[in-house]
Image (cartoon, rainbow, N blue to C red):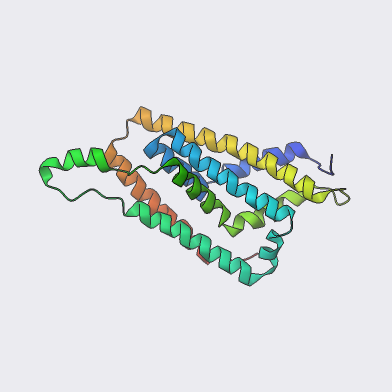
Amino acid sequence: MFGIHDLTLFIISGLLLNIMPGPDSLLIMTRSATQGWRAGSAAALGIGAGTMVHIFAAALGLSAVLSTSAAAFTVVKWIGAAYIVYMGVGMLRAKLRDGSAADADADVVARAAQPLAWRKIFFQGFLTNVLNPKVALFFLAFVPQFIAADSSNKPLAFIILGAIFNFNGMLYCHGLALFTAFASTRLNIKPLVSLWLNRTMGGLFLALGVRLALSEQR
């Protein structure tokens, strides 16, 4: 239908690609571990919304600009890298209130890993995904391999495959959120550990931001 072929191979490949670690997975795990599965799901939904932007942009040919224009790729790359670094710095700056040693433990319980509103977490996920030009180039390189050259409606076929990929990705992302939250509860992660988890993830986000900034157009 619509020139789509090897759909089973596409689904399997998409699932394998979704489980590869990256900023999306790190964000979901961080929010799930520190605020519960609902926060992780909010991040996952934001990531899914960002993915749909890439899918429609690629189907309409807008993402082709990133693959042919070095200037456009560089601009989007630096914006995305800056945002990921900004998130990393925010996580690294998580700290306790200034206070005496006597009330330090109570302060840890009250302040470690400041919770974010689900709306803010959603937009974190959305921006983390949509500002990554590598995602746009991925869809341009991966999806067309499963669309026949003589397809009667290539953009529609692209959108259908992209939606299937995103749906499977959302299943994995929500599963990751539930698993991380469940593991955190079973391990009884203390507030102070949650604080340092935020800081550790912040360092990883900094590294990912730098990696994205140094990436080259291919």
Q: Residue at x 50, y 37 (%)?
A: 41
Q: Residue at x 64, y 47 (%)?
A: 52
Q: Residue 11's x, y, as percent?
A: 70, 38
Q: Is residue 141 visible from the viewing direction of this image?
A: no
In the orientation shown, which residue stands out farthest toward the bottom? 71
17 or 160: nearer the eye? Answer: 160
The N terminus - image quarter: top right
The C terminus - image quarter: bottom right
35 or 123: nearer the eye? Answer: 123
Q: Residue at x 74, y 42 (%)?
A: 160
Using the rendered view, name the quadrant where residue 118 is placed: top left
Q: Residue 30's x, y, as percent?
A: 42, 43
Q: Is residue 32 left or right of residue 189?
A: right
In the orientation shown, which residue stands out farthest toward the top? 186
Q: Residue 146's x, y, as percent?
A: 78, 46
Q: Is residue 36 left or right of residue 160?
A: left
* Number of disc labels: 0
Q: Is residue 178 visible from the viewing direction of this image?
A: yes
Q: Is residue 168 left or right of residue 104?
A: right
Q: Residue at x 57, y 36 (%)?
A: 172
Q: Residue 85's x, y, as percent?
A: 43, 59
Image height check: is 69 above or below 202?
below
